[in-house]
Image: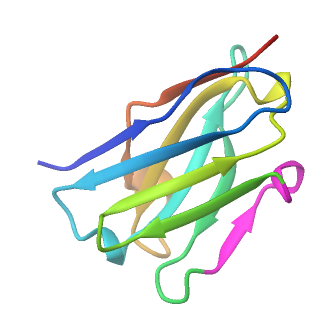
């Protein structure tokens, strides 16, 4: 059974940090491109960051560069999103997505999401 399970969300004060995890099972994780998306209330889901398969190169949405870091541990079948200097506008449900290289995210696997709330 294919599963992606996110964890690590929660309530954090502005300027704080969180590390999200995405645990994969039921497919060959190391062969899939991993991305993090987020969706804030009333807004469309947006791409946060992507990490590729072969060389682990990363790409970030412009506003997340320097604050967010995506990584993966293929041996543990787990992806991560380290988020620093969090802002209230980072409040959203965060989702991980795993897809075959060259395919659309909608054709890949999605987790159920984890809520991140940045508030004082």
Q: Quick check: 84 left or right of 49?
A: right
Q: Which residues are magenta?
A: 57-66
Q: What residue occupies the far bottom of the structure in this picture?
A: 55
Horizontal and vertical percent position of residue 34: 49, 62
- Looking at the rendered structure, the number of numbered marks drawn on it comes to 0
Q: Is residue 91 above or below residue 108?
A: above
- At 82% from the left and 10% from the top, the residue drawn is 120
Q: Quadrant of residue 56?
A: bottom right
Q: Quick check: 54 left or right of 29?
A: right
Q: What residue occupies the far top of the structure in this picture?
A: 120
Horizontal and vertical percent position of residue 81: 59, 51
Q: Is residue 117 above or below residue 113?
A: above
Magenta span has 41? no
Q: Nearer the viewer, residue 10 or 64?
A: 10
- At 77% from the left and 44% from the top, the residue drawn is 84
Q: Nearer the viewer, residue 65 or 15?
A: 15
Q: Which color scheme did the rendering employ for the protein?
A: rainbow
Horizontal and vertical percent position of residue 97: 46, 51
Q: Quadrant of residue 17?
A: top right
Q: Quick check: 100 left or right of 114?
A: left
- At 57% from the left and 34% from the top, the residue drawn is 94
């Amino acid at each position: 059974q294919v599963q992606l399970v996110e964890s690590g969300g929660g309530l954090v004060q502005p300027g704080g940090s969180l590390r999200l995890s995405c645990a994969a099972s039921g497919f060959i994780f190391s062969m899939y491109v991993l991305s993090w998306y987020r969706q804030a209330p009333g807004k469309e889901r947006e791409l946060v960051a992507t990490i590729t398969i072969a060389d682990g190169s990363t790409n970030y949405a412009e506003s997340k560069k320097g604050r967010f870091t995506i990584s993966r541990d293929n041996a543990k079948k787990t992806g991560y999103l380290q988020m620093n200097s969090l802002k209230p506008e980072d409040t959203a449900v965060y989702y991980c997505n795993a897809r075959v290289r060259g395919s659309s995210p909608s054709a890949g696997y999605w987790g159920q999401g984890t809520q991140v709330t940045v508030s004082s």
